[in-house]
Amino acid sequence: MKKIFQLRQTNKHPERVLESIKHEIRKYFKRERKKKLPENALFWDFECRFAQTAENAYKVTASELMKALDNAKAEQWERCYVEIIACAVFKNTNGCNA
């Protein structure tokens, strides 16, 4: 998933907009975890990147992503870029093997 989310929308409360974005991200995580793992894979891991624009995106963990969204709302960003790539983790490796 590579997407730019609008944090401010007309006629919508900012808290509701933020919750709908978080819900969409959690739904994506859940959907990706349900996919069949490749042979010898242990679990699905996620490489996440976050920023105001795609060019400035920096790595965050999946758990830090929600906190980053809260910080973006607190700083009153107009929009934010979220990139999430699912990859299988195999035995004897440290993270994604993309």
Image (cartoon, grey):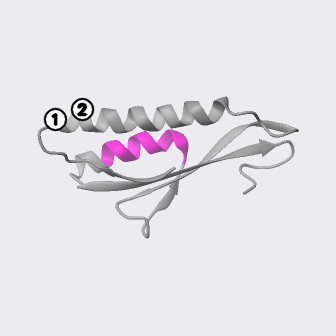
Q: Are marks 2 and 1 in contact (CB under 8 Å)?
A: yes
Q: Is residue 46 left or right of residue 73?
A: right
Q: Is residue 95 left or right of residue 74?
A: right
| Region in magenta | 61-71
At a point 40% along the width and 41% down the height, the residue shown is 67
Q: Is residue 10 above or below residue 56?
A: above
Q: Main secondary structure of the magenta part?
A: helix
Q: Quadrant of residue 50?
A: bottom left
Tag 2: Cα neighbours inside 10 Å, few (<14), some, or many (≥20)?
A: few
According to the picture, the residue beneath numbered tag 1 turns out to be: 13
At a point 31% along the width and 47% down the height, the residue shown is 71
Q: Which mark is residue 16?
A: 2
Q: For residue 66: magenta? A: yes
Amino acid type at circle 1 is His
At a point 26% along the width and 46% down the height, the residue shown is 73
Q: Mark 2 to mark 1: distance in Å?
A: 5 Å
